[in-house]
Amino acid sequence: MFKLKFKQKMKPNFLLCLTLRRKPAPDIYLHALNVAKVDKNEAVIFEDAPNGVESGLNAGIDVVLVPDQVMPSEKMIKKVTVVKSLADAVPLFE
């Protein structure tokens, strides 16, 4: 388990990025890090789908899985933090 702390409030500055490759390629997350000028060790991704989880892992970023309808494989689940809801993720940031 890991503990995360915000150094500053996040301000969304883009909603959609066009990349050459879709998830599970890491492009979208690597682009977001670049735009936000954030190191991957200071970031966390919230995902609800196996392709998104794989994309985050491929980018080398910590992933919090909030399962939706399709659960990733047990092998993938062992590499991420799993919470039942976003509310259950709050203690990760305290």
Image (cartoon, rainbow, N blue to C red):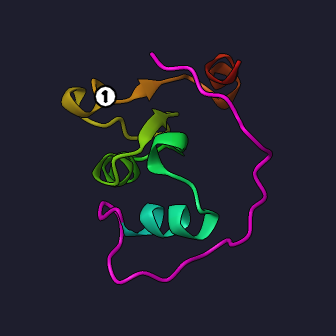
Q: Residue furthest left?
A: 75
3 in the magenta segment:
yes
Q: Nearer the viewer, residue 50 or 18?
A: 18
Q: Is residue 22 left or right of residue 28?
A: left
The amino acid on which the numbered mark 1 sits, given as a three-letter code, is Ile
Q: Position of residue 69 (x, y in %)?
A: 45, 40
Q: Position of residue 74 (x, y in %)?
A: 23, 26
What residue do we see at 45% from left, 49% from top?
Answer: 40
Q: Position of residue 4 (x, y in %)?
A: 60, 27
Q: Find residue 13 and report its image quarter.
A: bottom right
User: How many residues crowd mark 1 within 10 Å: few (<14), some (14–19), many (20+)?
Assistant: some
Q: Is residue 18 left or right of residue 26?
A: right
Residue 89 visible in this rendered orientation of the protein:
yes
Residue 45 visible in this rendered orientation of the protein:
no
Quadrant of image for the N terminus: top left
The residue carrying mark 1 is 77
Q: Secondary structure at mark 1?
A: helix
- Please state the extent of the stretch shown in magenta in the rendering: 1-26
Image position of 59 with respect to 22: above or below = above
What residue do we see at 55% from left, 78% from top?
Answer: 17
